[in-house]
Amino acid sequence: MHLRDKVVIITGASAGLGAQFSKDLAAEGARVFGLARRTERLNELAADIGPAFTGITCDITQEERVQDAIQQVLETAGRIDVLVNNAGLGKFGPADGVSLEEWNLQMDVNLKGVFLSTRAVLPVMKQQNADTGFGGHIVNIASVAGLMGNPNISTYNATKFGLRGYSEALFKEVRQDGIKVSCFYPGSIRTEFFDEAGIAISANPMTPEDISSTLVHVLKTPDNYLISEIVMRPLRPGG
Ligand SMILES: NC(=O)c1ccc[n+]([C@@H]2O[C@H](COP(=O)([O-])OP(=O)(O)OC[C@H]3O[C@@H](n4cnc5c(N)ncnc54)[C@H](OP(=O)(O)O)[C@@H]3O)[C@@H](O)[C@H]2O)c1
């Protein structure tokens, strides 16, 4: 898909990976709508990127807010070519120390948010496929924690394993509707994720630019070429 003038929605656009995706896709000529809760951060990004970026204040765990945000994109841009389900967080620690609040928060953002955003764009993409023969592309940002369990990240593991299952099922379900579904499994990336997660970042992580360059590549593949899963790691995480 050529990215020029394509309409892209990125959740969790106010920081880290989502901010980098927004910059790079706007630089490719896409019209980017970035969803997140922190309006001030979205405004700063809009000032940095320019008119190609529109921030929409939205908590992706809230059904009505997500529906309103998707509706706002449709009313403004008339179509949705790409959804990047990127918003997510981890709260790490021993399994018997996880509060119900921490469990619910990770489930809500990392899984329910993906479900709500995806459910809202699918009918739009299916209609686009009926009209033009190609529906769109959904990219889910999971983690290597969606492929292997590890001590002290059991809840985060559960959400990202869940996202893997959701992505695989969805990819098989909507490929005949002309909709691509890709799932990314990155290791450590230098972002604010670790401020909240409660563990130190590895010494030599990947950068948001690394992951973003692959997103651009995956989105630009020919319509009948689907990269459904990608694992990404730093070569020497210990430096
Ligand atoms: N960093 C890593 O090492 C790493 C590795 C593998 C996978 N990942 C995954 O990559 C994705 C992006 O993480 P990051 O590293 O870029 O972290 P980050 O810098 O902490 O950014 C997280 C983003 O998610 C948004 N967000 C959180 N809760 C939200 C909500 N309820 N509604 C809307 N947006 C919400 C935040 O925006 P607001 O706070 O403004 O709402 C922020 O923009 C996550 O899914 C994470 O699990 C990260």
Image: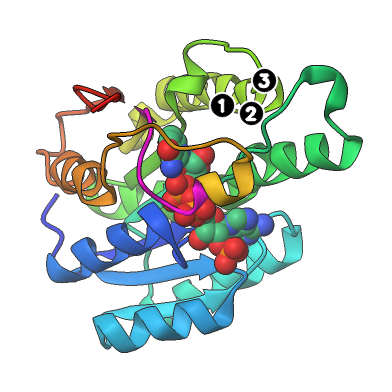
Q: Position of residue 194 (x, y in %)?
A: 52, 44
Quarter of the image holding residue 39? bottom right
Verify whether residue 190 appears in magenta.
Answer: yes
Confirm or reject: label 1 Cβ below 8 Å from ligand 1: yes
Quarter of the image holding residue 33? bottom left
Using a 10 Å C-alpha cutoff, classify the residue at mark 1 as few (fewer than 14 neighbours), some (14 to 19) or many (20 or more). many
User: Which one is in front, 216 or 235?
Assistant: 235
- Determine whether the residue tagged by mark 2 lies in a helix, strand or loop: helix
Residue at image coords 15%, 29%: 225
75 w.r.t. 80: above or below: below
Q: Give the labeled residue for mark 2.
A: 156
**Apparent side of residue 222 relative to residue 19 in the rendered image (left or right):** left
Q: Position of residue 28 (x, y in %)?
A: 12, 65
**Apparent side of residue 63 relative to residue 22 in the rendered image (left or right):** right
- Determine whether the residue tagged by mark 3 lies in a helix, strand or loop: loop
Q: Give the labeled residue for mark 3.
A: 152
Give the magenta range: 185-193
